[in-house]
Amino acid sequence: MRTGSNGEIAEDAGRDWLVVLGFIGVALVIRLHGLSSANLWLDEANSWQLASGPWHEMVRELRGSPVGPLYFVLLKLWIFAAGESVFAMRAFSVATSLVLIPVTYELGATLLSRRVGLIAAALVALSPLELYFAQEARMYMLTALAAALCLWSYTLWRSAAANAMESDTRVNGWPLVRYAIAAIALLLTNPIGGPLLAALNLDALIVWWRTRARAGIALPERRRLTLSWIGAQIAVVAALALYLAWLHLDSAASSQAWRTPLGLERALREALMLPFDTIAGQRFYPGDFAGAFGQLWHSHSGLGRFAITLIVQPLTLIVFVLAGDAAIRQRWSSRYAAESLPALASGRRLLLLALVTPLAVCVVISISRGLEPPRYFFYVVPFFLLLLADGVLSLSPRARIASLVVLLAAMTFGTRATKAAITRDSDYRATAQLIEHESSPGDRIMIQPREMGSPLRFYLHARETPIIGLAADAKAGDELATLAPGRTWVVMDYRSPLYTLAPAELATALRSPLERDAYTADVSNGVRVALVDTRAPTK
């Protein structure tokens, strides 16, 4: 309950927004620092290839993709204005992530309290997982923003509906319009956001059921609100139907055939690790205990890993447990006034539905088709942080301060680890430099597997050089034999069966002697490039 005059309330809100602006400033510094240090990896290169090409090619490619088109359309407009450098493309995700901070604050202030909103906004600004996707040229940060806006708009409409039913007045329909727009934007950015809409409809159903026979509620207004909500869902479903009719469903489904099943136990473990990824920015495995202790025992270089694994992450788990327990105890010990609407006042229930429903869908899908929760269900992270902030505030003052210190320490270690990783998947920067420095007119490039041609072409300044893509299971020697005699740069990603062959075995597989053979990235997860000349006699 807020007390005091309107001027005091406005003054408090004004101070809150100054603090939120401070969070945005800190987040901006963290996100812009080293924004272009890491290489543009495969998925980001695909974003560049789609957004930098002609409109008709982008439309054709997106019709066979399971990912929605909205991000790529916006990225194409962004590239037109800001350029297509690594910094410029990732800056779009940075801008999106900064908008998510005040939206998170508004969600917390509307559903729970202003202090919850402030703590959650700070956690969003400092989370290493938020940092990672803010520095990636993909649609995941835009998906998170669309999901937060969708939930916020629904929250505003739900609050207005509660007031309208109690006073028998007309409700402002703009929040519901904004909800429908945000829901459509969410589905057109990434259809995997659909479970959030299911959670919101479940909450609306609970509200409708619990208020169906409540005294003091105007039934005509309740009917109008019910019909309005149904109309908004029809608009969202109609937009989704049009999108599905435009999409080539067979191609979109076949593009995900490579995903392997995880099984129930592993799928559950992956989903339950999301809180640790959010706070510490890295995966936590029980086997790390022994490794971290041994590393600390033999050298001081393992101190950081020891601190994260043996101290920070277990303490973070304790914070999760204590905060959740305090929030549950506070919830069950509270008493609602007789004139209040319990179903409409429960912000915690809404956040829990918004968090648990998508993760439950993630587990069900991952049993047969593996999905990474930190990536594909990243949009639930602000909802988790809001619940965490609510739980922390339910603790005693001393426990609250200790919990915030632990969370800040975990995020500091996680941010440091995220910043230290300057390579994401295969790094084609050195490969492109090698080919450009040593290539001759008429050279060509053959790459296996073919999809890795996107990051290589991005870093090649001489983009007119022909790149021949090979399927992952294709025989490179057979393909070389069909080409006209000449020099060919054979680029092998670590996914290629040729990557680990000894030089003599590689020459035999390519049916040509090697003039050049080099690893241009870390041999455990990188790129190998060989130069062969089919005009030379085979030894």
Image (cartoon, rainbow, N blue to C red):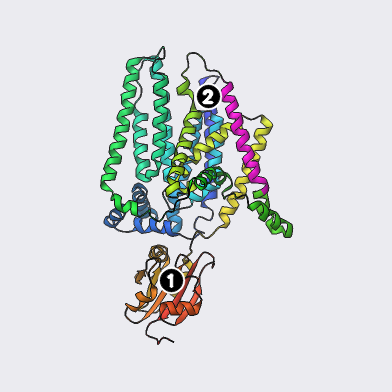
Percent x, y of residue 239:
29, 39
Question: From the image, which quarter does the C terminus lie in?
Answer: bottom left
What stretch of residues is rendered in magenta? Answer: 310-334
Give the numbered dot on residue 9.
Answer: 2
Q: Which residue is mark 1?
A: 491
Percent x, y of residue 214:
41, 14
In this rendering, position of residue 416 left or right of residue 518: right
Q: Is residue 201 visible?
A: yes
The verdict on residue 332 being magenta is yes
Which one is nearer the viewer's eye here, 423 or 310? 310
Task: Give the SS element for disc 2.
Answer: helix
- Give the mark nearer the N terminus: 2 vs 1: 2
Q: Amino acid at mark 1?
A: Val
Question: From the image, which quarter does the N terminus lie in?
Answer: top right
The verdict on residue 321 being magenta is yes
Q: Is residue 165 above or below residue 77?
A: above
Which one is nearer the viewer's eye here, 448 or 141? 448
Q: Amino acid at mark 2?
A: Ile
Depth check, mark 2 against mark 1: the one in front is 1
Give the Cα separation between the discs numbered 2 and 1. Answer: 63 Å
Number of numbered discs = 2
Percent x, y of residue 110:
48, 28
Percent x, y of residue 227:
31, 24
Task: Give the SS element for disc 1.
Answer: strand
Give the prevailing secondary structure in the magenta stretch. Answer: helix
